[in-house]
Amino acid sequence: MAYALPLRTIASVDSDGELIVRTADGDGSAFEELYRRYARPVFGLALRRLGDRNRAEDAVQETFASLWRSAGTYRPERGPGAPWLYAVARNAIVDRARRRYEPPVETPDEPADEAGPEEHAESAFTAWQVHRALEELPEREREVISLAYWSGLSQSEIAEFLAIPLGTVKTRTRAALMRLADLLEELQ
Amino acid sequence: MNFDELVGGDDLTPEERARLRHVHDLLVEAGPPPDLPPALEHPSGPPADAEVVHLPLPRRAAAAALAAAAVVAVGFGIGFVVGHAKEKPTSFVTARVVSMHGNVPGRFAVLNIGKKDAASNWPMELTVTGLSPQLARKSYYELWLTKNGKATTSCGTFRVHAGRTTVRFSVPYSFKEYDGWIVTAERTGGHSPGPVVLTT
């Protein structure tokens, strides 16, 4: 069975790095495209770290204000744009987190079984990349992925909900996974 | 969810299957992306005090760059609404979509928000799935805007029939003041807001 990719190809889209460079030159449309791609991943990252929607919202605003101010420091030869943007977001979120007084806690005698900072950081970056890639999916593919993974619906139920054949659900799901694989490889 | 059920078929090469399996695992690990609060749907634009540091430009080029920046600034923030708007057969023009989920499997909703009309009202179309139909005439559901997750402003009430139900609302509120939506189960004469059945 063949699964045709849509007309829009990854190569035809400006890379994150190109958009950052254009933002540094004051290109508002490039900034807006970066916002479209990253607002949700930044908000997700902030929610994980801050655990509060209002503060996470502020962190998103600060991240993009910081992006606008510091885009000129991005050097394309040092790597792709996604990790650089991740660093900008992380700094803004950490800055936001420090603004709230947090009383010191006693250090436990025994090492905890819970994931440590490295595991948390890796997990956060994975979510960042996945949520970033999801933003690039066509709406109809993002819809089936969301329903399949996070709504608890079976594929038959998805077909019923969307009023499309079960085969179409399967086709869109596989096409979405293939596209996500391409996008995630490109982001790394 | 079962990976083999999702991708189906055995026409994939082992390499392709492994590749998709990796994406599947990443999706499971990442979890769902959050819904953006209404205030974050659009970029607020460059901060007023923002400065972009440039290398010195010849005066003519600098003037051209300033003019270009002014043009860009005028169009700033418009792109999302225009870019995401799509015409539905029922002529409801969706500017953005908010998904809502319930606390039981199969219970969810999609809230389509239209463009603000000439009278500054926001049209909304809510499609709910999996909510129990009301047996008592006194029972109904209510859509609320929330602050800090708590119901503060009612957007309207509705009843459902079996399966999926679509209802429309029109509200004059500024969404920037709120952080989400919830649907509660209500009963005439009962304590309001009632129990939350759907949330963003």
Image (cartoon, coloured by chain):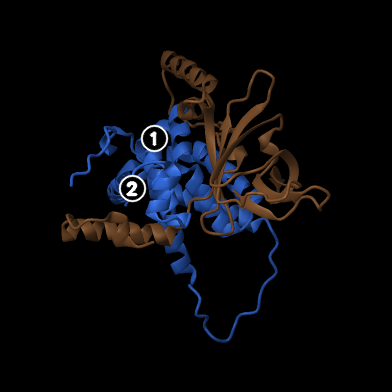
Chain colours: A blue, B brown
Asked if B95 appears above or below A125 in the picture, the reply is above
Q: Residue at x 47, y 58 (%)?
A: A152
Residue plotted at (51% across, 48% down):
A42
Q: Is residue B136 visible?
A: yes
Which residue bears the numbered disc 2?
Answer: A166
- Look at the numbered disc 1 and give the secondary structure of its residue: helix
Graded by Cα atoms within 10 Å as few (under 14), some (14 to 19) or many (20 or more), the crowding at tag 1 reads many
Residue A67 percent coordinates (x, y): 50, 40
Kind of residue indicated by mark 1:
Leu
Q: CA distance from mark 2 to mark 1?
A: 39 Å
Name the front one of labels 2 and 1.
Answer: 2
* Whole-percent x, y for residue B3 in the image: 32, 61
| Res A79 visible | no
The answer to whether A34 is drawn above or below residue B141 in the figure is above
Chain of the residue under the numbered disc 2 shown in the image: A
Going by the picture, which residue comes out furthest to the right?
A: B189
Name the secondary structure under disc 2.
helix
- Read off the chain for label 1: A
Q: Which residue is mark 1?
A: A19
Q: Nearer the viewer, residue A175 or B178?
A: A175
Q: Residue at the far top: name it.
A: B60
Q: Amino acid at mark 2?
A: Leu
Rendered location of residue A61, percent (x, y)? 58, 41
Q: Residues within 10 Å of mark 2 (few under 14, many from 20)?
A: some
Viewed as shown, does residue B87 lie left or right of B174? left
Residue at the image point whose x is 39% and y is 40% from the top: A140
